[in-house]
Image (cartoon, rainbow, N blue to C red):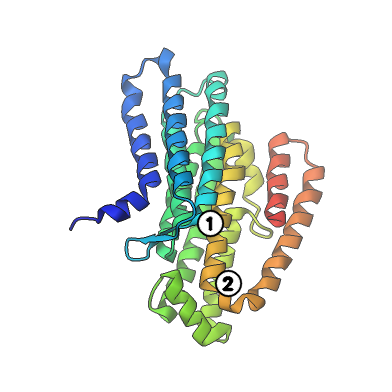
Amino acid sequence: MTLPLDDLLTILPELLVVGAACLLLVADPITPPARKDILAWMSLGTLGICFVVTAMSMGERVFAFSHLVVVDPYASFWKLLLYFVSGLTVLLSITYLKEEAIDLAEYYGFVLLSLAGMMIMVSGADLLVIYLGIELMSISLYVMAGFKRFEARSIESSAKYFILGSFSSGILLYGISLLYGVAGSTRLGELASAVDARGLNDPLILLGLMLLIVGFGFKVAAVPFHMWTPDVYQGAPTSVTAFMAVASKAASFGAFLRVLLEGFGGVKPNWNGLILGVCIVTLIVGNIVAIVQTNVKRMLAYSSIAHAGYA
């Protein structure tokens, strides 16, 4: 079976990012230590090309792969933001990796793989596609959090993130399975039709929505699903902490908002108050606890929790 060319062109930025990540992993062994910086500049070049390609396609709403993926102004906005944040992360990492003696050129490959997962998340028009994007992003971040492999705190950070991330992914997947049982499909359009027909009076739809909120709540570190954040941010390399605090949350917000608005938009009055309540509690708890922190990274963690509430 061959894939239509139009579908491949629709996901061209994702293909470029994944291809560059694979190229970086191959180029690492043959790149002299004194010229490792070229890998960072290759990453930046890829981000620049993707930025131009995405900006040129803004204004169109195109579905691909049988309505599994959508490229629209909403997805393009989040992608442009993610390119910018990823570029800043790469620039920060050039000096940081030298200062911390982290000689792992796979780092830039994992940054791009994580970015690819985020791009899939914000472009997903199907719950399973969004879930696959989440897993690609998360697995890359699990590894990046433990890049200081000779420091116990970094290994602990990676292990905690992996365990709690896997737990939240399981909750999210269970919610998706319940919604699939009701709608007979994981596509957001067909899910919206089932939700409009049955409403939240259907216990499976209600439970599925609650599980999605819990699963995404872990990903964006909203209260009360935020307890993993301070320890993970404190143990991870600083550049990874910055990347996780901004890029991963932005992608999670982008995907979550699409699911709510396109899948559950017909019952917005029912979930709007719940989301608002979570946001208020999150910004209050995040700001108050951040004040008493003595570690900069832990303060950043609680500050990012508060920002989740503002968003």
Circle nearer the viewer, 1 or 2 = 1
CB of mark 1 within 8 Å of CB of mark 2? no
Corner quadrant of residue 89: top right
Q: Earlier in the sequence, mark 1 or mark 2?
A: 1
Task: For label 1, count other residues whose C-alpha is less than 10 Å away and answer few (under 14), some (14-19) or many (20+).
Answer: some
Decide which of 143, 194 is in the foreground and name it: 194
Q: Identify residue for label 2.
A: 210
Decide which of 80, 38 is in the foreground and name it: 80
Corner quadrant of residue 45: top left
Residue at x 44% of width, y 49% of height: 57
Decide which of 81, 248 is in the foreground and name it: 81
Task: Residue at the far left: name it.
Answer: 1
Residue 191 image point, x, y percent:
46, 75
Q: Secondary structure at mark 2?
A: helix
Residue 28 image point, x, y percent:
35, 25
**Which corner quadrant holds the C terminus?**
bottom right
Residue 118 image point, x, y percent:
48, 49
Q: Is residue 10 left or right of residue 85?
A: left
Seen in the picture, residue 60 relative to 298 is either above or below; the reply is below
Q: Is residue 268 visible?
A: yes
**Which corner quadrant holds the N terminus?**
bottom left
Task: Residue at the far top: name it.
Answer: 34
Residue at x 63% of width, y 47% of height: 229
Residue at x 48% of width, y 59% of height: 169
Q: Identify residue for label 1.
A: 74
Residue kind at label 1, given as amino acid type? Tyr
Residue kind at label 2, given as amino acid type? Met
Residue 46 image point, x, y percent:
42, 34
| Residue 133 image label | none
Q: Is residue 156 visible?
A: no
